[in-house]
């Protein structure tokens, strides 16, 4: 597979065949993100996409799950996505579902009929970068949506038969606001009920635009110790729906994952143990300067 840039996909898609259909992210303005800043967004030619599908087919590949990359594949025009889906099912008759990343704005630009068409053609799950349940945080981080817009588009997504997974980030509200953000984000998820939740606890790099806000004193990053408290609060408050959860902390030897609600107590205990352990140490900030 030819791939340009850094591979990024939800951990629940690790066994899926990843088919690149674009390079980079069409939005690419989130101030915390460095994944795509060095890339110019473009759609890949259909000839290249079909050649990659044929390559896997000729090697005997017939995956049941396909993930369309890169940063927000739903940006592609619907007729182009439908062409790609037709190729996927032609060469991979065992394919049961096709998933991809998306933004709330991508959804706003698709009609109800287009979303239903995509679902009928095999798309099952869209992963949305929700990140936070606080509107002022979304605005500061230059996300492409408000909470109300996210609620509206998730309702449309579900009405079309699709399901959604959510990316969010402990630490995104900054130092001192972890519990506030946990409670607001839990409220959002309790209302929208994602099937998958992925927490990429905030990791900051000097190349990220947000680093300039840190230098200017406009943003103070939370410690990983506070992020653990935030994650615990959020997991304790999630209720009324079932989902799979995976949480990462780049600067800690810790990963929290399981299925809610049945694994909640085990995950909370793991977090309690980590909180007690790391509270005895100097604060750790996930920052590469």
Image (cartoon, rainbow, N blue to C red):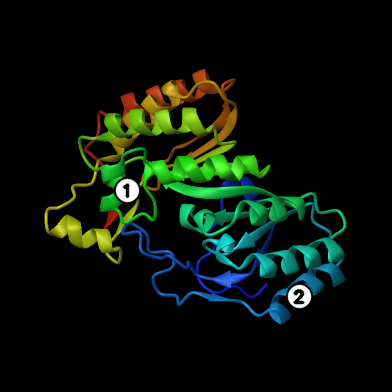
Q: Which mark is residue 50?
A: 2
Task: Give the image location of residue 280, x and y in percent.
Answer: 25, 28
- Residue 238 visible within the image: yes
Residue at the (55%, 39%) spot, across then down: 155
Residue 181 relative to residue 253: left or right: left
* Residue 203 in the figure: left or right of residue 113: left
Q: Is residue 180 above or below residue 20?
A: above
**Pick the front one: 261 or 120:** 120
Q: Is residue 22 above or below residue 85?
A: below
Q: Could you say which is closer to the camera, residue 138 or residue 38? A: 138
Residue 19 horizontal side relative to residue 53, left or right: left
Could you tell me which quadrant the C terminus lies in? Answer: bottom left
Q: Residue furthest left?
A: 217
In this rendering, position of residue 162 left or right of residue 267: right
Location of residue 85 (image quadrant): bottom right
Please identify the quadrant where the N terminus is shown.
Answer: bottom right
Callout 2 secondary element: helix
Q: Nearer the viewer, residue 86 or 63?
A: 86
Query: Which residue has dot 1 on it?
Result: 138
**Going 76% across and 51% down the picture, which residue do you hit?**
120
Residue 91 has which mark?
A: none
Residue 61: x %, y % from top left: 83, 62
> How busy is the neighbourhood of tag 2: few (under 14 within 10 Å), some, or many (20 plus)?
some
Residue at left 45%, top 77%?
40
> How much space separates mark 1 and mark 2, taking CA atoms?
37 Å
Crowd tier of the residue under label 1, counting other residues whose Cα lies within 10 Å: few below 14, some 14–19, many 20 or above: many
Q: Is residue 49 above or below residue 9?
A: below
């Amino acid at each position: 597979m030819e791939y340009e840039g850094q591979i990024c996909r939800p951990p629940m898609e690790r066994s899926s065949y990843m088919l690149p259909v674009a390079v980079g992210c069409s939005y690419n303005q989130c101030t915390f993100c460095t994944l795509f800043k060095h890339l110019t967004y473009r759609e890949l030619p259909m000839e290249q996409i079909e050649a990659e599908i044929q390559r896997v087919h000729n090697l005997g590949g017939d995956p049941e799950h396909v993930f369309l990359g890169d940063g927000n594949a739903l940006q592609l025009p619907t007729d182009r996505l439908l062409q790609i889906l037709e190729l996927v099912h032609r060469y991979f008759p065992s394919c049961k579902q096709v998933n991809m990343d998306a933004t709330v704005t991508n959804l706003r630009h698709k009609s109800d009929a287009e979303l239903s068409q995509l679902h009928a053609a095999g798309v099952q799950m869209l992963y949305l970068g929700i990140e936070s349940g606080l509107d002022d945080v979304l605005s500061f981080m230059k996300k492409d949506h408000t909470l109300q817009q996210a609620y509206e588009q998730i309702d449309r997504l579900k009405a079309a038969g699709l399901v959604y997974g959510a990316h969010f980030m402990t630490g995104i509200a900054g130092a001192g606001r972890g519990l506030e953000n946990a409670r607001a984000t839990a409220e959002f998820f309790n209302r929208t009920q994602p099937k998958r939740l992925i927490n990429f606890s905030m990791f900051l790099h000097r190349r990220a635009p947000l680093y300039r806000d840190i230098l200017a004193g406009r943003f103070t990053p939370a410690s990983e110790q506070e992020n653990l408290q935030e994650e615990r609060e959020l997991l304790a408050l999630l209720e009324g729906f079932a989902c799979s959860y995976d949480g990462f902390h780049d600067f800690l030897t810790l990963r929290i994952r399981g299925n809610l609600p049945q694994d909640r107590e085990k995950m909370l205990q793991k977090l309690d143990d980590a909180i007690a352990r790391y509270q005895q140490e100097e604060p750790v900030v996930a920052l590469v300067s």
